[in-house]
Amino acid sequence: MGEKLKTLRLNRNLTQKQIADRIGLAISAISSYESGMRYPSYETLIKLARIFHVSADYLLGMTDTRSIDVSCLDDESIKCISQLVDILKGKTSK
């Protein structure tokens, strides 16, 4: 999990302090998560997943699939996003 968390953070050009401030933790906690010395609580894991727009399963290494929260979108918008993802993957949309 630590490596994924660090990669996600660096890809978004965020510091450990910025992440720590967002979820109300000390920088040392984020450092410990990234180094694999500690694991976050369930509550913190959910906050991290929301910050990086990935699933908790992705952070925990249970899947390599990242996800995007589309719960606030209507069905037509979700369909459009699905078609865009297919195009980006090189698939043809039907």
Image (cartoon, rainbow, N blue to C red):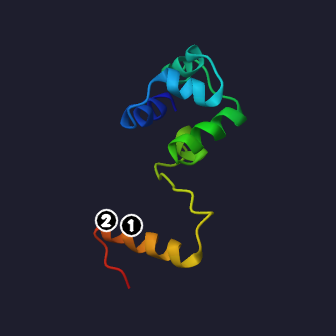
Residue drawn 37% across the image and 70% down it: 84
Residue drawn 44% across the image and 24% down it: 15
Badge 2: few (under 14), some or many (20 or more) residues near its Cα, within 10 Å?
few
In contact (CB < 8 Å): disc 2 and disc 1: yes
Residue drawn 62% across the image and 63% down it: 71
Furthest residue toward left: 90
Element on which disc 1 rests: helix
- Whole-angstrom CA distance, mark 2 to mark 1, is 5 Å
Looking at the rendering, which quadrant does residue 38 occupy? top right
Q: Of residues 51 and 31, which is closer to you in this image?
A: 51
**Residue type (three-letter) at the residue carrying disc 2:** Leu
The tag on residue 85 is: 1
Say if 70 sits above or below 41 in the image: below
Is residue 18 rendered to the left or right of residue 94? right
Residue that numbered label 2 is attached to = 88
Say if 22 sits above or below 59 in the image: above
Q: Position of residue 58 (x, y in %)?
A: 53, 45
